[in-house]
Amino acid sequence: MLASETRVPVSNGFSGPALSPPRSQPTLAYDEIGELLTDAELPSLSAGEASGLMRSGHMTAQRYVLSLLSHINQRDGRIQAWVFLDAKAAMNQAKTLDALAPEQRGPLHGVPVGIKDTIAVKGQNENASSTHIVDLGMPTRYGSTIHDHDDPAPADAAIVSILRSAGAIILGKTATTEFAATSRGGSCRNPRDLSRTPGGSSSGSAAAVADGHVPIAVGTQTGGSMIRPGSFTGTFALKPTWGALSTEGVGRFSISCDTLGFYTRNMDDISLLSEIVRISPGSRNIPPSLRPSSCRVALIRSPMWPKAGPGTRGAWKQAERLLQQAGITVVHVELPKAFNRCYDWRETIVSAEARASFLPQYLQAKERLHSSIRKYVESKEHPSGKAVCEAYDCVSQLRNQWDKIAGEFDFVLTPSVPDEAPVGLEWTGSSAFCTLWTILHAPALNVPGLVGNSGLPIGLTVTGPRSSDSRILEAGRFVAKLFEDSQPAL
Amino acid sequence: MLASETRVPVSNGFSGPALSPPRSQPTLAYDEIGELLTDAELPSLSAGEASGLMRSGHMTAQRYVLSLLSHINQRDGRIQAWVFLDAKAAMNQAKTLDALAPEQRGPLHGVPVGIKDTIAVKGQNENASSTHIVDLGMPTRYGSTIHDHDDPAPADAAIVSILRSAGAIILGKTATTEFAATSRGGSCRNPRDLSRTPGGSSSGSAAAVADGHVPIAVGTQTGGSMIRPGSFTGTFALKPTWGALSTEGVGRFSISCDTLGFYTRNMDDISLLSEIVRISPGSRNIPPSLRPSSCRVALIRSPMWPKAGPGTRGAWKQAERLLQQAGITVVHVELPKAFNRCYDWRETIVSAEARASFLPQYLQAKERLHSSIRKYVESKEHPSGKAVCEAYDCVSQLRNQWDKIAGEFDFVLTPSVPDEAPVGLEWTGSSAFCTLWTILHAPALNVPGLVGNSGLPIGLTVTGPRSSDSRILEAGRFVAKLFEDSQPAL
């Protein structure tokens, strides 16, 4: 069933088939006013821009995919964002999409997407209907040798299915740390500085978007796996309210914390995706209600502030100044002491849930699991059932309290990471500033645009009460604009 | 890759290959004292008994599987518990297990298991190691035509992987209602009375165990999908504390409620399974601490009591009398008023989560979804994000309160269902008595043994605080013995 000759493993640098334009297809692309778009310009288009041009016939999906594949071909030998990429299947999908009548074209028509390699993508199916486009077979490896020889999944993960229904092309699988559950980096590099980690565990998804391989990519966060790579690579990263997106088909780490999210290069694409997955209906079309003169923002340094390095401290000061200059009322908020204990409760919950999650792999092949994963199952100091229930209940109370605290403000700003991306690929960096919002189930958005001492990106997180995703998108748009206007382009 | 000729779809009655004994294999089975076991006796063995005989060489796995396949062959045309069954693959697995040295034989060595068809089972893999036994390919259909043509999964669901590691043989997939999310019955019948539903959604798993096809089967519960079929078919059904078992690889309905569970024909097998999946380590070996003279049991009729019919009312009275006769202190407990609201909060949570769960299928093929599933996505009256968060927080408080109330007693007894299984296959029955314990994340165990007015099974539920699984197993053993001693065998 597997068409192995069409598979292009790229872990040792992209070495796909020669990327010549397909015969009998338009090879040119134009912008909205009819100007020719060059190959160099296409990788910087947003998903919204690209799908708009494709829907209106200014550009074919084949042209766009080919251009991105060529860009990846040039770049990914160094970046190694992709662990699996099927150029031929992507071109087939593009061809099918190009044949659709304009009224059948979805909001992500022709947009190639990267999927973190802990998320299932459907393999080819002989009985697939002609309108539901499937690729030739894209295995899921979870960054683990345990799944080295697995066949492709019979069905898409929920999120992949939704994106496909919107017209997206599933281009390939992106690098992840082992089961998205360790901070041991792989070979994926940060496009901003190849000597540094892109962060983890959604390493490849963040790097691919930052480097222009695809306009959007899907990742997951259990601790800080969306926000941290977002900050390190200078991309927008949205981790929505827990539960808003189904994680069916996603590798399990901690059921109470695992959350899907998106990387993009601008806020429009974050809003577009949020509409498509229905976590923020109409968010692109509602008139902005955020008026600086009446806007109150909570600045929360969080109990992790002592971990902040010069990059984050500088960005923090700058953000406060920019908000004030914009006429916004800035309030420094210290969380009640109970929130300090949230970190321990989170640890208890995650370790109990991870134990259940990794028991199958442990029984099957414990020698192939990283020691930190083995430890979840082996640890003699498992939290007792009572301790786990206490952690669940206390965290639940804090969620309610958090909603009230955050609900007093138009939005909350908080650090994303301690500093710029660390040098080296061994360690994917600290999630210290991210875990609180994950366990609180709050939506979190990394807004890039500021820089640290080495000129590398520092993002800050916009957050708010649970289910306030629409509001934090609006706030994110506002903050992104402030940052953008204040900085020379990276 | 698919060896389609070895597939034996059984939806129209079992029509597998001729089941002749394999050549050069022992065709006889003996009990522990060396007496010959007949074909008619093997289907009534428990998993513990059968695997014990196979581990000690009194019986081969091939002999056992063959005997169960023959039993299924005779019975399943009427029962229709199985939607997929691969006789050849099962025999291959048995052969491989028979070749294992005694010290390599696991606690479920050679035991055939039924898996609800919303749970992924790994297909054949050329690269599988010889010690990890895989079958030829067993697709997952979710009781939905949407997955009619899917290939088998590349990896086992977490629970399947754990059972396989313990030496179980994955015999086939059992009937479920659509996505385990409707109460519309299929063609599966109740072995106790073929004119009645076996209950749902885990219809086939309960029926297969009740009818002696397999000693154990796996199901799931989001409302009452484990307990209700357990009561209707007279089987033991354990729904452990939420979160104790990973639901990775299980079709998603409601992330806060979906819980895996087991059907067996006795308490020993429930304990055996609980040990294997590590939710109740050592539960078979700890000396029973439940002493009737100092034992206090809470009888909770629950707010659903007005729905109880004569069968459940009779069983309820009988259980109270039996407990009292055994010297146990019985306390009638009425839950605080706040618990009445739990049903609405559950509704809010399940409908919000189901909306996220079924959005992919809705976008892909809404015309193939049952109207009750479509409604989760289409409903104009979605609970607001705020209402959902309120429901989460209030239910969380009740969980804590429940632990305290239940923690005052050795165990809690409560009805499983309104009455005996309803006549007809259209409707799988009411989950009214089950949903409270599901949303409270409490462990729940259906204990069969009493009967209703038509002589059909009525079970009662043993429950307790979250994470008290070990304790309710011990209580279940006690209650089961009481019921057993009081009744003529069904």
Image (cartoon, coloured by chain):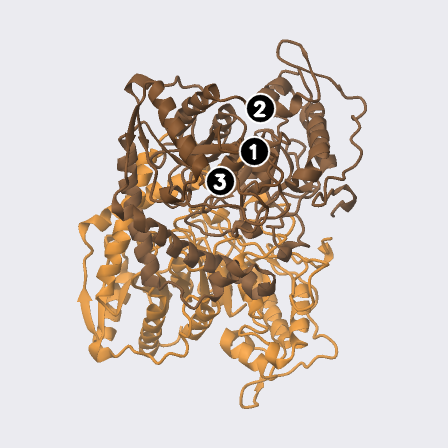
Chain colours: A brown, B orange
According to the picture, the residue beneath numbered tag 2 turns out to be A46
Name the secondary structure under disc 1: helix
Indicate the chain on which mark 1 is placed.
Answer: A
Q: Nearer the viewer, residue A316 or A156?
A: A316
Q: Earlier in the sequence, mark 1 or mark 3?
A: 1
Q: Residue at x 49, y 47 (%)?
A: B179
Q: Nearer the viewer, residue B270 or A81?
A: A81
Tell me which corner region of the image, top left, top right, bottom left or bottom right, holds residue B89: bottom right
Q: Is residue B154 visible?
A: yes
Q: Secondary structure at mark 3?
A: helix
Kindly report the distance in space between the C-alpha atoms of the residues bearing marks 1 and 3: 24 Å
Q: Pointer 3: what residue?
A: A228
Q: Position of residue B30 (x, y in %)?
A: 58, 85
Task: Give x and y (percent) for residue B128.
Answer: 69, 61
Q: Label 3, label 2: how many angstroms apart (C-alpha)? A: 22 Å
In the image, is residue B66 above or below residue A427? below
Q: Amino acid at mark 2?
A: Ser
The first of marks 2 and 1 along the sequence is: 2
In space, the residues marked 2 and 1 are separated at their CA atoms by 16 Å
Camera-nearest residue between B293 and A175: A175
- Disc 1 residue type? Leu
The residue beneath circle 1 is A163
